[in-house]
Image (cartoon, helix red, strand yellow):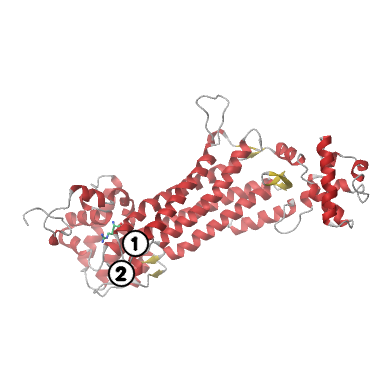
Amino acid sequence: MSKQTHQTWGGRFTEPTDAFVARFTASVDFDKRLYRHDIMGSIAHATMLAKVGVLTAAERDSIVDGLKQIQAEIEAGTFEWRVDMEDVHMNIEARLTERIGIAGKKLHTGRSRNDQVATDVRLWLRDEIDFILGEIRRLQQGLVELAARETDTIMPGFTHLQTAQPVTFGHHLLAWFENVDRDHARFADLRKRVNRLPLGSAALAGTTYPIDRELVRDLLGFDDVCRNSLDAVSDRDFAIEFCAAAAILLTHLSRFSEELVLWTSSQFNFINLPDRFCTGSSIMPQKKNPDVPELVRGKTGRVNGSLISLLTLMKSQPLAYNKDNQEDKEPLFDAVDTVKGCLRAFADMVPAIEPKREVMREAARRGFSTATDLADYLVKKGVPFRESHEIVGKAVRFGVEQQRDLAQLTLDELRQFSPEIGEDVFAVLTLEGSVNARNHIGGTAPAQVRLAVAEARQRIGG
Ligand code: ARG
């Protein structure tokens, strides 16, 4: 018993922690990022302890004051983080005792690091979710305003990346609006499950002190308290859910990225991205690379990795807290940082997209994009759809041989394929005729896109 044992739990130990083990088990290098929320939680806990008579008002005041000064030290960069104090919680508590003496040693009454860390992560994540929700809205705003300018711009719509039918660029942009709108809904929904208070669960079974969890819940702005102490200290499903929503969001952004990469290529040439979102090549002077979308596309892998890490971390863990859970932080932090970075890049970049309307239109004109319109035209004249499909197929083959689009064929040429074709066919073969004809909710007609823009603006409160 002569050797110096650990400051926090040395009572039971006969020798100090091995130096490597201390470093290996420490989390302070990354969990110090939770300091603000740790202090917030501790202030609420101390306030409650004083209210129920476990601390005196003087002790509470000294704790609250000490914690605020520690926060100031951390923010000024003068706080000394100690690896031997393992994590953010014990670092702050040790410093508190150093500053205010005996009252500092009472802060941890009725609490464990198990309910403390679960509380900190939830408080921290709640703030991050709120920021992310705002960034998704900012991206949606960019999309809807760009769509509003491009309601009448015609581009080829694709299936299998082959020209399919003409669509309006505004309609295409609103497709991206819709899928990130669901991401917004997913984050807003999982926030409800994040926003529950674990404190009061203590190590696993609750505590013998006459605590007032409702008060702490209220002070910290949680919607409810966690209803079971074993569950509250041990589960990290809220972090898994966050990563799942993040992975879906990044999957969407990766698809959008892929389109931007294609569209900026000289082969498509549909849009220009301003130079500030691109980089050059160190060897090829002509290059202007769409690095931002490429990088976002690549970062999807990181977030998927975080999701798999957390699922695997949680799998098969017996109740209640296990040290495994310390490993929840880095993947979660990385997912949050990645999502924020990607959203910022996209929200900044989307309003700067410069469409090349003539190139888009020209691309839609090539590739027989109005062939379905001709088939529908024949159906309306009484030809069964399968027959009209066949007739139009032949007309397209003729056009391919002639290197002319359907609208460039003469009436006589078209009539070789079906006598039902009349002068009025040219109205349906034009790009405008084609998009205007799809005039229903969810359709690509400019009139519908204008309505969709108005509805979308309303949905995001813009
Ligand atoms: N640093 C720990 C974590 O992140 C805090 C909780 C530790 N609890 C314990 N009983 N060792 O999970």
Residue 383 visible in this rendered orientation of the protein: yes
Q: How far apart are the two marked residues, 2 and 1, measured between alpha carbons? A: 10 Å
Task: Tell me the residue that label 2 is attached to.
Answer: 201
Mark 1: amino acid: Ala
Residue 43 visible in this rendered orientation of the protein: no
The 10 Å Cα crowd at callout 1, few under 14, some 14 to 19, many 20 or more, is: many
Q: Is residue 405 above or below residue 315?
A: above
Is 131 left or right of 429, judged from the image as shown? Answer: left
- In what element is the residue under mark 2? loop
Q: Position of residue 185 (x, y in %)?
A: 53, 60
Write down the quadrant of residue 358 in the picture. top right
Is 222 left or right of 272, judged from the image as shown? Answer: left
Mark 2: amino acid: Ser
Q: Quadrant of the C terminus?
A: bottom right
Q: Which mark is residue 313?
A: none
Q: Position of residue 243 (x, y in %)?
A: 45, 55
